[in-house]
C-alpha cells in the first residue's frame, strides 16, 4: 500500500510539472511556414516568417510575408492540453482558441486549433481554422524563449 501511495504521489507530481509548462509564456521565432496536405505531408512553402507568442490564456501569431504585408492572429485560449517536458524539447501542447485573423485591412473571427510539437529538440506548430480544416499551416520554429510570468 505504501508503494502504491508513493507511486501515485509521484505521478500526480509529474503531471503537475508537465501542466506547469503551459503556465509559462513562450516567444517563438518562425523560420518557415508551409501548407500541410490532407495526408499531413509538407506542401507549398509560403515564403514567410514571423513570431508566435503563447501565454497561459492567449496565443498571438504574426506572419510576415515577403511582399511586406503581414497576417495577425490573436486568440483567447479556451482549452489547453499540455504534455511537454521542462525544456520544451519533447512533447506536445494542444490549444483551442477563439481567434481574430487580420490581414490587408480585413478581419474575421474563427475558432482555431493549434498543436505545438517538439521532437528531439525541433519544434513545429500546426494551425488550422475550424471553418476550413483543409487550410492547415505548419510553422517551423528556429528559436524559442521561455519568458517568466
Image (cartoon, grey):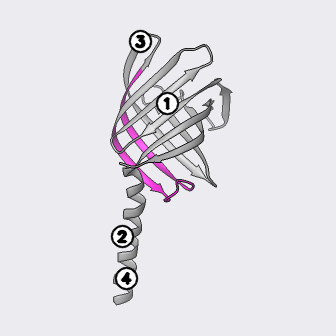
What residue is shown with label 1? 133
Which residue is located at x 49 percent, y 20 percent? 71
Q: State the image coordinates of residue 95 (x, y, percent, origin top left).
A: 41, 42
Establish if 81 lies above or below 78: below
Q: CA distance from mark 3 to mark 2?
A: 46 Å
Q: Residue at x 57, y 50 (%)?
A: 118
Residue 40 image point, x, y percent = 62, 38
Mark in the foreground, 4 or 1: 4
Q: Are marks 2 and 4 in contact (CB under 8 Å)?
A: no
Circles 3, 4 touching at the beta carbon (< 8 Å): no
Horizontal arrangement in the rendering, residue 5 relative to residue 63 (left or right): left
Mark 3, residue position: 106
The residues colored magenta run: 77-101
In magenta stretch: residue 90: yes
**Looking at the picture, does residue 9 appear above or below residue 49?**
below
Label 1 element class: loop
Q: Secondary structure at mark 2?
A: helix
103 relative to 2 in the view: left or right? right
Amino acid at each position: 500500500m505504501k508503494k502504491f501511495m508513493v507511486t501515485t504521489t509521484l505521478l500526480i507530481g509529474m503531471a503537475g510539472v508537465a501542466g506547469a509548462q503551459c503556465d509559462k509564456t513562450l516567444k517563438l521565432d518562425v523560420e518557415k511556414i508551409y501548407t500541410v496536405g490532407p495526408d499531413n505531408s509538407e506542401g507549398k512553402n509560403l515564403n514567410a516568417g514571423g513570431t508566435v507568442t503563447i501565454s497561459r490564456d492567449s496565443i498571438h501569431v504574426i506572419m510576415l510575408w515577403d511582399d511586406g504585408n503581414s497576417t495577425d492572429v490573436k486568440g483567447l485560449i479556451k482549452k489547453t492540453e499540455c504534455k511537454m517536458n521542462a525544456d520544451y524539447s519533447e512533447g506536445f501542447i494542444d490549444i483551442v482558441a477563439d481567434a481574430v485573423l487580420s490581414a490587408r485591412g480585413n478581419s474575421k473571427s474563427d475558432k482555431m486549433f493549434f498543436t505545438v510539437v517538439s521532437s528531439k529538440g525541433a519544434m513545429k506548430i500546426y494551425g488550422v481554422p475550424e471553418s476550413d480544416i483543409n487550410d492547415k499551416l505548419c510553422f517551423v520554429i528556429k528559436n524559442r524563449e521561455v519568458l517568466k510570468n
